[in-house]
Amino acid sequence: MKERSTKNLSDVVMNNIIQGEMYNRGVKRVVDIILALILLVLFLPICLVVACAIVLDSDGPVFADVPERVGQSGKLFKMYKFRSMIRNAHLLLHTDTRFRELYQQYKKDSYKLKDDPRVTRVGKFIRKHSLDEIPQFLNVLLGEMSIVGPRAYYPDELENQQKKHPETQPYVKDVLSVKPGITGLWQVSGRSEVHFDKRIALDARYAHTISLVQDIKIICETPIVMITGKGAV
């Protein structure tokens, strides 16, 4: 009887370690740091090629100058991404009258554009294969993001989309309870083909069922999405 009790206790502890809140606060962070360091080293040659291609292709910095994103508990942070658009693309979309119709389409299409004239030639390639997101491993090391997690949303995106889809408000609360990820359930489920209401529901489901097994599954599916470019814009 004592041996059975000890075994049951061990099973409970192990389950808590690999899923739920204990996993999210402990093991997941360790895995994030180890994977981020390994992948940064592996992707370093690609990063150098991408950086050179960006500089040669268009005027502007190597890294994208974009507004802060909403992280865990609503904390804002600067996301690192390779620049895939013209200089000041985000500012121009919001303020330049030439992009007025484009901005309305942007909001209508869940803050994604399929045929975006601001995207550069190199940008089209690195966005299709998610190479623009490699610098986000720096955000992981800084503790602002995780390897796997929900999408990192813009503040105005969350505000406007909740007005458009008020039924998603409970989902947003769940999503902000965990760190956003470089990849995640919605990325391997269609990426930009998934609109906000479905996307935030997927992200909330991930937050509710967070576990090591689920993270491993998503990580294994991500290279296929990167290579095929399915759902990218």
Image (cartoon, helix red, strand yellow):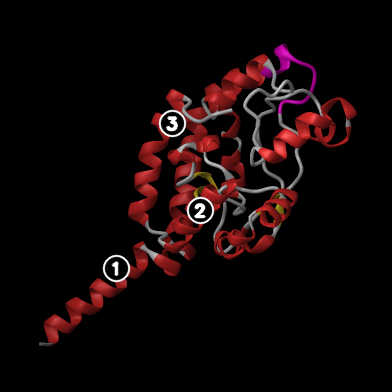
Q: Residue at x 48, y 25 (%)?
A: 229
Provide the residue designation for mark 1. Answer: 14
Instruction: Tell me residue 162's x, y (percent).
Output: 67, 56
Query: Reading the chain from its start, which is encountered first: label 2 or label 3?
Result: 2
* Quadrant into which the C terminus falls: top right
What is the distance, in whole Å, between disc 2 and disc 1 at their CAs? 25 Å
* Quadrant into which the N terminus falls: bottom left
Instruction: Tell me residue 5's x, y (percent).
Output: 17, 84
What is the distance, in whole Å, between disc 2 and disc 3 at their CAs? 17 Å
Q: Is 125 situated above or below 214?
A: above
Question: Badge 3, how many Cα within 10 Å: few under 14, some, many 20+?
Answer: many
In this view, the residue farthest toward the left is 1
Q: Secondary structure at mark 1?
A: helix
Please tell me the numbered disc located at residue 51: none
Residue 146 seen in render: no
Q: Secondary structure at mark 3?
A: helix
Residue segment shown in magenta: 54-62
Instruction: Tell me residue 34's x, y (percent).
Output: 45, 47
Q: Residue at x 64, y 60 (%)?
A: 166
Query: Reading the chain from its start, which is encountered first: label 1 or label 3?
Result: 1
In this view, the residue farthest toward the bottom is 1
Q: Amino acid at mark 3?
A: Val
Provide the residue designation for mark 3. Answer: 225
Q: Secondary structure at mark 2?
A: helix
Please tell me the numbered disc located at residue 203: 2
Q: Nearer the viewer, residue 46 or 202?
A: 202
Q: Amino acid at mark 1?
A: Met
Q: Is 202 situated above or below 173?
A: above
Q: Amino acid at mark 2?
A: Asp
